């Protein structure tokens, strides 16, 4: 049978479908994944006819859409074929008909929950010890982690990141404008829930509104649950999962620049694209290049370190927090004119009428993903201490994530069932913030949390670990040390004061509003991006 | 990209001169983006003066609960400037009248000097004149051995290794790297200690086309022969602070040379024995007094 439904934007812009057979109906997400796989395959195999067999993987399996994996003619277990599509490049009118098509196999992955346990399927003894330590002795485990972070923060080599030299940008080298669609190439980690991804989707929408065709490249294998979001409806999608074969990197990029009038590249946490920027700058020197950076990662260096390595090839670094601005300019000596601070404060309302609170006791809440970074286990320990100090208080933990099972077990072990309410991501965060008198942020690293803004808008007092740029939005008195035991002691004392001393609470609330408003008055990322794309479109 | 400058004026009981200081700031050809007035708990009409000026756009008044001295005021003002995201703090006393191009010349002079030297320079200060146009003896900066290096290249700039807090432009990176002035010094030698501290790796500059007038009652530098009952308190801080600096941050011999200089000055001025003993006590206090700088934190 032949489907009449186009797979996605790549079908008309990059490849033509010669023939298609379907054994099972694809849902929208799978359709966009297959469209992306075909787009990458056609661009990496110019002037070839491709016969692509797509199969649906086992539940929990991630898709494999590119590189060596698509040359594998086998699949495992309950996987099964869902489509066989013969395609060639849309511009390859002269692709010979009599050449035998090249056969490829694309794994569309299986159904996955939104959050996946970050444990390897076959954990090594090291991993088993790691998980056991975290679940059985989380505070001691965390204390050791924070000591390691201290060492890494002080490491002198952090100040000396080697730089890759690049050719200078040359607008004069631009080819004459043709009738190719104007485009912006976006590099993303993946299309899953995350602050950087949320901002990336805003940018993709802004580029489309500015008259650009968005091209979205992701470099992390993922089931891409957000690929069906309306912001991506017209975007050409390039899901790179495994490393591409030899020469295919350049072939892919050359193919993209042949097919589209790419005016700019905007990176949102995409290692593959970062690493290829010096080559792109030398090969296509007229292209504008910008990136958006969100968070410093002390252990790995993260995307900030990668960006510093290739800063020579980047025209402008957009940062969302004052801490990152100072890190790039003062510590990494990136020229000040290349660093733009534009916050995401306007993605969240900062003022609103406080909701009517329910009568009765106090509510102390945690809102966030249940991951190592957010340290939900510290909140549980805090609850265990506060339940004795504030017997009428209620505690809410709102979120889900890879530590969910450990957290539930820990909660049972600490006997918190009667005072701690667990809320899943199916419930609105705004409801929890309406209920909350105090929001506790126990993370060991952050950029600047949007939840702090939301909490302030809901009249909840924010008590936070003093990490990242939290100092920008949290009252000085309510910042707690990052190390777990001092954090627990300080957070406990602040929560008790906030609940039992209404005058102090009022002073803190006023200071919180002042700080949030001052931060909200900084330049906004939406406006900066709009102006940037306008400049690229000139 | 526009660089932001926060002017920091530290004041204590100078209601008569403060309006001129603030009017001169408003009349700059390149005005500061924000003016922060740190009121060290003044007990005269300063609050009334500041109530009027504080209502003007761009001027913010921070009234401290206690008098923290010039050192404490500058440390607080620079900290607030840093936390407010300023690229530069431009610091000055409450009797410093800036000529219209004072700030513009500091900014352009620092930029040109950094390009010539190929490095970041930790501060730029103005030429400080007394009310009669002569150089203000109290505020003459100390030059480096190669002070004319940029002059011969055509820049109206000399290289200096220390200066007083009367119109000094301090870049953000300097505050991040070297911290803030030592508020524990309270008064005297806080500016010397700070500017010597921040010139550890590169000299500061004095921009000869950036001028301010320091409206002091008399034009006379620090001289230990002038010690008397009325000004003893101020010299006491000076002796303690400089003894501390020389002993802990230069070397022991430098502290002893300083003691010798104080002794010679007191002897020349025939300063009463009681006052000399008090200053000797302050010198000894300085040997165990070694405050550590606070580092500002990024907020905005």
Image (spheres, coloured by chain):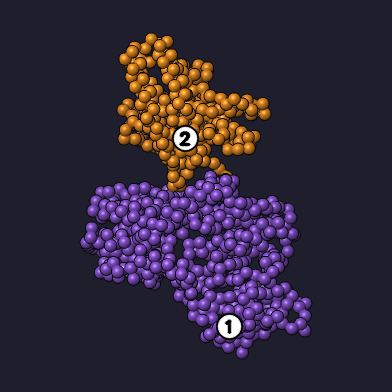
Chain colours: A purple, B orange
Q: Where is residue B268 in the image (x, y as percent from the top left)?
A: 42, 10
Q: Which residue is rendered at x = 49% and y = 80% of the image? A: A59
Depicted A66 relative to depicted A433: above or below: below
Q: Position of residue B286 (x, y in %)?
A: 38, 27
The chain that hosts pointer 2 is B
Horizontally, is B218 left or right of A289 in the view?
A: left
Q: Mark 2 points at which residue?
A: B7
Which of A157 and B80 lies nearest the eye of the viewer? Answer: A157
Report whether residue A516 is seen.
no
Q: Which residue is rendered at x = 43% and y = 34% of the image? A: B181
Total marks in image: 2
Q: Element at badge 2?
A: strand
Report whether residue A132 is seen.
yes
Residue found farthest to the bottom: A1
- Quadrant of residue A234 within the rendered picture: bottom right
Inter-mark Cα distance, 2 to 1: 69 Å
Q: Element at badge 1?
A: loop
Q: Mark 1 points at which residue?
A: A75
Which of A47 and B181 lies nearest the eye of the viewer? Answer: B181
The chain that hosts pointer 1 is A
- Quadrant of residue B68 within the rendered picture: top left
Nearer to us: label 2 or label 1: 1
Sort mark 1 into few (<14), some (14-19) or many (20+) by Cα contacts within 10 Å. some
Residue found farthest to the front: A125
Q: Which residue is rendered at x = 31% and y = 58% of the image? A: A438
Which of B284 and A463 lies nearest the eye of the viewer? Answer: B284
Depicted A97 relative to depicted B276: above or below: below
Q: Which quarter of the rendering shows the N terminus of chain A?
A: bottom right
Q: Which residue is rendered at x = 34% and y = 48% of the image? A: A477
Sort mark 2 into few (<14), some (14-19) or many (20+) by Cα contacts within 10 Å. many
């Amino acid at each position: 049978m032949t489907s009449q439904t186009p797979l996605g934007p790549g079908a008309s812009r990059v490849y033509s479908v010669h023939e298609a057979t379907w054994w099972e109906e694809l849902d929208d997400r799978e359709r966009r994944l297959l469209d992306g796989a075909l787009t990458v395959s056609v661009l990496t195999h110019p002037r070839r006819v491709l016969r692509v067999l797509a199969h649906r993987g086992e539940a929990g399996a991630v898709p494999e859409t590119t590189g060596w994996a698509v040359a594998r003619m086998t699949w495992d277990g309950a996987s099964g074929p869902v489509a066989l599509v013969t395609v060639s490049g849309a511009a390859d009118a002269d692709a010979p008909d009599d050449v035998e098509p090249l056969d490829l196999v694309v794994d569309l992955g299986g159904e996955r929950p939104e959050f996946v346990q970050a444990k390897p399927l076959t954990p090594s003894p090291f991993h088993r010890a790691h998980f056991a330590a975290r679940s059985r002795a989380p505070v001691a485990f965390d204390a050791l982690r924070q000591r390691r972070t201290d060492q890494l923060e002080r490491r002198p080599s952090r100040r000396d990141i080697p730089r890759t030299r690049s050719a200078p940008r040359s607008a004069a080298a631009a080819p004459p404008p043709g009738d190719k669609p104007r485009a912006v190439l976006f590099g993303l980690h993946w299309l899953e829930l995350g602050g950087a991804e949320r901002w990336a989707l805003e940018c993709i929408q802004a580029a489309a509104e500015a008259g650009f065709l968005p091209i979205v490249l992701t470099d992390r294998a993922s089931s891409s649950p957000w690929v069906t979001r309306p912001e991506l409806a017209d975007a050409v999608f390039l899901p790179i999962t495994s490393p591409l074969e030899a020469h295919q990197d350049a072939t892919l990029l050359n193919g993209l620049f042949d097919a589209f009038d790419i005016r700019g590249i905007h990176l949102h946490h995409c290692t593959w694209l970062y690493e290829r920027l010096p080559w792109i700058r030398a090969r296509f020197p007229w292209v504008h290049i910008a990136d958006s950076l969100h968070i410093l990662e002390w252990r790995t260096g993260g995307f900030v370190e990668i960006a510093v390595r290739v800063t020579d090839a980047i025209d402008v670094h957009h940062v969302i927090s004052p801490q990152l601005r100072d890190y790039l300019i003062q510590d990494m000596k990136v020229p000040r004119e290349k660093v733009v601070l534009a916050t995401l404060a306007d993605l969240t309302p900062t003022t609103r009428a406080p909701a009517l609170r329910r009568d009765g006791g106090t509510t102390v809440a945690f809102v966030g993903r249940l991951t190592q970074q957010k340290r939900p286990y510290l909140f549980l320990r805090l609850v265990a201490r506060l339940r004795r100090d504030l017997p009428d208080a209620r505690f809410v933990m709102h979120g889900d994530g890879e530590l969910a099972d450990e957290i539930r077990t820990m909660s049972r072990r600490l006997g918190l069932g009667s005072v701690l309410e667990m809320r899943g991501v199916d419930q609105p965060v705004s409801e929890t913030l309406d209920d909350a008198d105090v929001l506790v942020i126990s993370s060991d690293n952050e950029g600047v949390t949007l939840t702090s803004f939301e909490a302030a808008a809901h009249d909840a007092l924010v008590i936070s670990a003093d990490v990242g740029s939290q100092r920008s939005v949290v009252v000085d008195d309510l910042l707690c040390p990052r190390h777990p035991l001092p954090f627990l002691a300080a957070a406990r004392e602040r929560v008790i004061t906030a609940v039992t001393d209404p005058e102090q609470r009022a002073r803190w609330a006023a200071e919180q509003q002042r700080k949030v408003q001052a931060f909200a008055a900084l330049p906004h990322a939406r406006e900066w991006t709009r102006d940037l794309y306008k400049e690229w479109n000139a | 990209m526009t660089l932001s400058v926060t002017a920091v004026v530290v004041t204590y009981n100078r209601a008569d001169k403060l309006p001129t200081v603030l009017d001169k700031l408003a009349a700059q050809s390149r005005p500061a983006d924000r003016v922060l007035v740190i009121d060290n708990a003044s007990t005269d009409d300063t609050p009334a003066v500041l109530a009027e000026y504080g209502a003007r756009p761009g001027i913010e008044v921070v009234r401290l609960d206690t008098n923290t001295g010039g050192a404490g005021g500058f440390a607080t003002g620079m900290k607030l400037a840093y936390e407010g995201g300023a690229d530069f703090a431009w610091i000055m006393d409450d009797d410093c009248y800036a000529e219209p191009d004072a700030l513009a010349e500091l900014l352009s002079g620092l930029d040109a000097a950094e390009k010539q030297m190929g490095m970041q320079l930790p501060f730029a200060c103005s030429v400080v004149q007394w009310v009669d146009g002569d150089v203000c003896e109290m505020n003459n900066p100390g030059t480096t051995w190669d002070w004319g290096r940029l002059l011969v290249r055509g820049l109206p700039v000399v290289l200096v290794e220390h200066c007083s807090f009367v119109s000094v432009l301090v870049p953000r990176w300097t505050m991040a790297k070297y911290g803030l002035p030592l508020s524990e010094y309270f008064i005297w030698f806080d500016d010397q200690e700070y500017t010597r501290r921040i010139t550890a790796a590169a000299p500061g500059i004095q921009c000869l086309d950036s001028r301010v007038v320091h409206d002091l009652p008399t034009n006379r530098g620090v001289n230990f022969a002038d010690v008397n009952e009325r000004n003893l308190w101020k010299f006491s801080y000076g002796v303690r602070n400089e003894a501390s600096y020389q002993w802990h941050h230069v070397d022991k011999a430098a502290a002893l040379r300083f003691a010798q200089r104080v002794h010679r000055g007191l002897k020349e001025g025939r300063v009463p024995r009681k006052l000399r003993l008090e200053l000797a006590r302050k010198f000894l206090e300085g040997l165990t007094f070694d405050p550590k700088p606070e580092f500002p934190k990024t907020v905005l």
